[in-house]
Image (tube, rainbow, N blue to C red):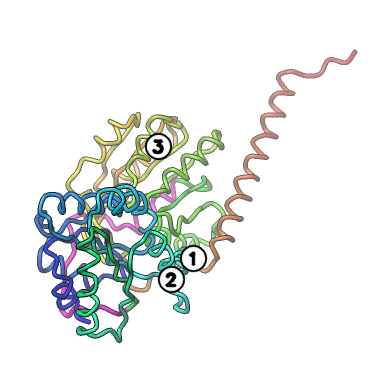
Amino acid sequence: MLAERFVEILGSEFYTGVPDSQLKALCDYLMVRYGIDRNHHIIAANEGNCTALAAGYHLATGKVPVVYMQNSGEGNVMNPVASLLHDKVYAIPMIFVIGWRGEPGVHDEPQHIFQGEVTLKLLEDMGIASFVVGKETGEEELRGKMAEYAGILEEGKHVAFVIRKGALSYEGEACYENGNAMAREEIIRHIVEVSGTDPLVSTTGKASRELFEIREEKGQGHRYDFLTVGSMGHSSSIALGVAIHQPERKVWCVDGDGAVLMHMGAMALLGANHPENLVHVVINNGAHETVGGMPTVAGQMDLVAVARGCGYPKAVRVTSYEELDRELLAAKEGKELVLIEALCSIGARPDLGRPTTTARENKEGFMAYLSERKGQEGERKSNLHHQQHPCIPH
């Protein structure tokens, strides 16, 4: 089904959401039709955020909004659905459009498998009537379902359209670019050169895929890295947990602007704890590139000022590889929490692969490495203690 026909049938005047590759046709159409127009289309920081934004639209206009997301975002909408939208509370009607990643029987990445299995069940548990849209779904069938859903929406309830892979198409073209000089994969290559054998936590999406291929190319193995294949927005908190409990090790977090925005409260947590052994590198291209390139608001904000306001002792922005290397080396040698915002272009190699190890293998290798290093550090401290306090025979 053409994305423009899908939008016409839904009949809403306001769309907000978090982009998804399964919904790329819809997202591209909305960008070409509206761009980022606060009256009609806003890309939000996370799915709960856009649900609340849509609720505000309904309160102000009395009209029904559309919220779009990947099914991984269902977890983020549970609270506003249950405590804000529900007809036992404010009875705010809403249409959800959800990309079905990990649909049973359809090959997908490991982080999507369980989420795909429970997608429809979660909607049912939240009291959201759902309809699956596939390649075979016709316009008349969809119109009939919308006519049925009109009564549900009038009661202040909510409905969902779950979109299968390839169900929507768009023949137009949306162009996403910026004027930044550095490339993300090359930025990660520079980080790897400086971080060496330090533990590194990388965010979900193409950043982790590029890190994996760089390690393969260098023949280094993957035990130094924790590849956060899901849980968008939580890599810096994972890195914080590692840094606190491995205080003798420098720990690196390779993050993205979309991920930082999704759970920005994590920056306040990092600043409050200010581990002196953590380096937080945010690669900012102002885009949700992994799922198509739609813009984030990070291209319009001062992330360095946000980090300083959250309590980071040091925060800098770099726009060239020379500046990047200088700040990476300083962070490596320093003893304070650092944020390095690296501005980069939009784009990746067309032949970029995916990790060939499983998520569990990645976890076990990373944990074994941390345990090994912790044991070596403990032995070093023990030897130093005995040298400083030799036993005196009686």
Gap between marks 3 and 2, in whole Å? 39 Å
Question: Under tag 3, what secondary structure?
Answer: helix
Snapshot quadrant of residue 206: bottom left
Image coordinates for residue 367, horizontal then vertical, percent: 60, 50
Question: Under tag 2, what secondary structure?
Answer: loop
Snapshot quadrant of residue 344: bottom left
In the rendered image, the residue lying farthest to the top is 394
- Please tell me the numbered disc located at residue 102: 2
N-terminal-most mark, 1 or 3: 1
Image coordinates for residue 170, horizontal then vertical, percent: 19, 78
Gap between marks 1 and 3, in whole Å? 38 Å
Q: Nearer the viewer, residue 115 or 20?
A: 115
Image coordinates for residue 175, horizontal then vertical, percent: 16, 68
Mark 1–mark 2 contact, CB under 8 Å? yes
Reading the image, the residue beneath label 1 is: 114
Q: Quadrant of the C terminus?
A: top right
Mark 3–mark 2 contact, CB under 8 Å? no
Residue placed at 41% from the left, 44% from the top? 236
Q: What type of secondary structure mainly makes up the magenta span?
A: loop
Magenta-colored span? 166-194
- Please tell me the numbered disc located at residue 331: 3
Q: Quadrant of the N terminus?
A: bottom left
Mark 1, residues whose alpha carbon is within 10 Å: few (<14), some, or many (≥20)? some
Question: Under tag 1, what secondary structure?
Answer: helix
Image coordinates for residue 135, horizontal then vertical, percent: 30, 84
Residue 288 as seen in the image, left or right of residue 224:
left
Q: Nearer the viewer, residue 388 or 43?
A: 43
Residue 175 lies within the magenta run: yes
